[in-house]
Amino acid sequence: MPEGTRPGEGAATRSVSVPSPAAADVIARVRSVPIDIGPGLVAPALSALVEPWLLVTQPEPLESVDPELVSRAGRIEVIDSLARADLEALARRTPAEIRTVVGLGGGMALDAAKWIAWSRGLPLVLAPSIVSVDASVTNTVAVRDGGTIVYEGFVVADRIVVDTDLIASAPPRLNRAGVGDLLSIHTGLFDWRLGSHAGRIAWDAGIAEAAARVLDRVELTAPEIAAVSEAGVGGVVEMYAEVNALCLRAGHSGPEEGSEHYFAYRLEEVTGRSFVHGEVVGLGTVLMATLQRNDQARAVRVLDTCGVAWRPRDQDLSRAMLLEALTSLPAFVRAHALPWSVADEADLSPAAAGRLLDEALGDERD
Ligand SMILES: [Zn+2]
């Protein structure tokens, strides 16, 4: 399913899939994955593995783990690409005797580990070293195929290890930004409802209510997210897992993704830059909530309480860039056949987009 972007994707385009809802037994399996949260959990988790196991990681998290534990890995893969050819080569060269795949790192390491476990049918343990993206709980892999990102495979981890000491070694700004993909429920749900009113997509009140409850929990957890505390980091991963299960039930990303993501994708194209995903999605949520007349103040309050650097000046974005992204958004969503949203209905002429920026950002423009 389309799950949004990972940092560093730049202006790649995305393929949009319209999968059907997952079967009940698959959702039950996804929901039953143990998520262990606490300090120092990686060491006992690795010690308990039957050897040999494969460690799939990245340079920074690798340095944060006890070398004695790392030395027990039967094989180590340090990942710098999610290109299809590289992923296929990884799976091919994984020795037959490997008993478990361990993904330890950011989205790239976790997705590569998921790919190997899926294509080789191996047990999978995921230990995020940062909570800026939701790769530790999602089931598909964001494969780079030419200039396009395709979500492929389907794998359910056997265990997710949220070692809060390991995560605390990542930059706090990036960990705080993880909330952006949860706050997007605020505008995503609104767009999903618009789509249902327009006859484009079915509405599911039960799933929507459950997603709204996650949003309430985001707001309650915001001070802990800002502090990058155990409750904040663990809460973000648990809420990612809940939202992932809701999207599987729905068969689409409507519970958490809408025009705020489309704006972020368009802004990447306009600027040719990549952003911290949660920060640019946070900006998109404020702008699109304003366009939707949908409690924009709540989005600002949550982002600010979490300490997310979402404002244009934090991301080195000019008013001209924002205007270009906004005015070209309707054509962009049509060209990519993105699910129905406020971008299909609202006035985003240059004058209207200018008023939107004034209203959403006040004197913070430029
Ligand atoms: Zn996203």
Image: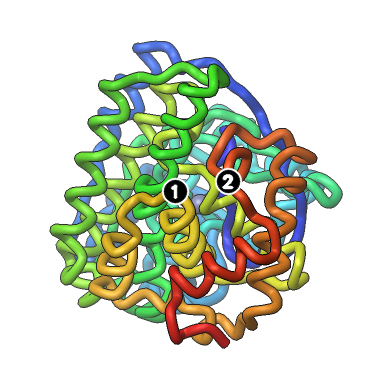
Residue at 52 percent of width and 86 percent of height? 313
Q: N-terminal of the two: label 1 or label 2?
A: 1
The residue carrying pointer 2 sits among few (fewer than 14), some (14 to 19) or many (20 or more) residues within 10 Å by Cα, namely few
Q: Are marks 1 and 2 in contact (CB under 8 Å)?
A: yes
- Quadrant location, the N terminus: top right
Of 173 and 342, which appears nearest the observer?
342
Report helix, strand or loop for mark 2: loop
| Disc 2 C-beta below 8 A from ligand 1 | no
Q: Does 226 sit above or below residue 147? A: below
Q: Does 43 sit above or below residue 338? A: below
Can residue 78 be spotted in the picture? Answer: no
The residue carrying pointer 1 sits among few (fewer than 14), some (14 to 19) or many (20 or more) residues within 10 Å by Cα, namely many
Residue named by callout 2 = 346
- The image position of residue 88, as x and y in percent, is 75, 41
Report helix, strand or loop for mark 1: helix
Determine whether, in the image, residue 256 is placed left or right of residue 214.
right
Of 46 and 313, which appears nearest the observer?
313
What residue type is disc 2 on?
A: Ala
Label for residue 292?
A: 1
* Marks 1 and 2, how far apart at CA: 8 Å
* Quadrant of the image occupied by residue 178: bottom left
Determine whether, in the image, residue 64 is placed left or right of residue 86.
left
What residue type is disc 1 on?
A: Gln
